[in-house]
Amino acid sequence: MMIDYCYHTHTKRCGHARGEDEEYVLNAISNGIKVLGFSDHVMLPHISQNGIRGDFSLLEDYLSSINRLKEKYKEQIEILIGFECEYLEDFVPYYKDLLKSKKVDYLILGQHCRIDKDNNVEWYFSKDTPLANYTKYKEDLIKGMRSGLFKYVAHPDLFVPSIKGEFNEFFINMSKEICECAQECHIPLEINLNGHHYYRPYPSKEFFSVAKDYSIDFIVGVDAHTPNDFARLKEDWYLSFINEYNLSILPRLKMKEY
């Protein structure tokens, strides 16, 4: 199996990635990628999260830069423009406008936090995450899957590294509910290659031992934060992981009209 795509790619605008946009393109080409999707953390109007997502003022620079590279390298690689987004009800109209205007090709669902009506940010996971926050994550993720806005779910097992103690019945049932919704909504789940450095890493054996029993398609995501990250696609460990759980991997994402 050779994965020749990446739809989960960040840029330095988010504040925690490094490298120039063109470096990502050149490194993707050198690592055999045929389809490269940029999906930086979505810039949100009136929201400031330094080091987490780019300021809204950077939106047009992001779009123009990737469009320029799309044209420049069109003979060597297909480049798409997207965003990684939290499902946030107040921003659903904004997400719909981005898609309908064709400014972006796709959105992926990456649920990291909530933002309330006063623009306060609430992170789901911390060193001492209360069980209620896991429930909030699950519920918001399910709302996002059911919204029809997103092409796939990034790191659905993002919650696993924060678990202290046993992956018990609570977390098993939580995983089942996520997978049941993914199956119902026909939305792929991501095998994320950027979480293997955690003490309790993702892709998580605990989560995927549940997910394997559902009729779900899976997608591989580099979650690139530096241009060199595309080399992960040449590593063997994730292919062994895929084979261990007999996961059905999509060869490419199909882009649809909104």
Image: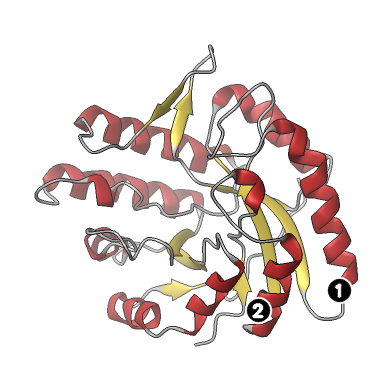
Judging depth in this view, the residue of 72 and 241 nearest the camera is 72
Q: Residue furthest front?
A: 19
Check the image and report above or below for 35 versus 111.
below
Residue at 49% x, 49% y is 185
Q: Does residue 81 appear left or right of residue 129 in this picture?
A: right
* Mark number displayed over residue 74: 1
Residue at 60% x, 57% y is 18
- Report whether residue 185 is seen: yes
Judging depth in this view, the residue of 122 and 34 nearest the camera is 122
Q: Does residue 85 appear left or right of residue 174 in this picture?
A: right
* Mark number displayed over residue 220: none
Residue 76 at x, y = what percent? 81, 81
Q: Residue furthest top?
A: 118
Q: Secondary structure at mark 1?
A: loop
Q: Earlier in the sequence, mark 1 or mark 2?
A: 2
Residue at 55% x, 31% y is 49
Q: Does residue 201 appear left or right of residue 123 in this picture?
A: left
Q: Quadrant of residue 91?
A: top right
Residue at 29% x, 63% y is 208
Q: Does residue 226 appear left or right of residue 244 in this picture?
A: right
Residue 116 at x, y = what percent? 49, 18
State the separation of the CA atoms marked 1 and 2: 13 Å
* Mark number displayed over residue 33: 2
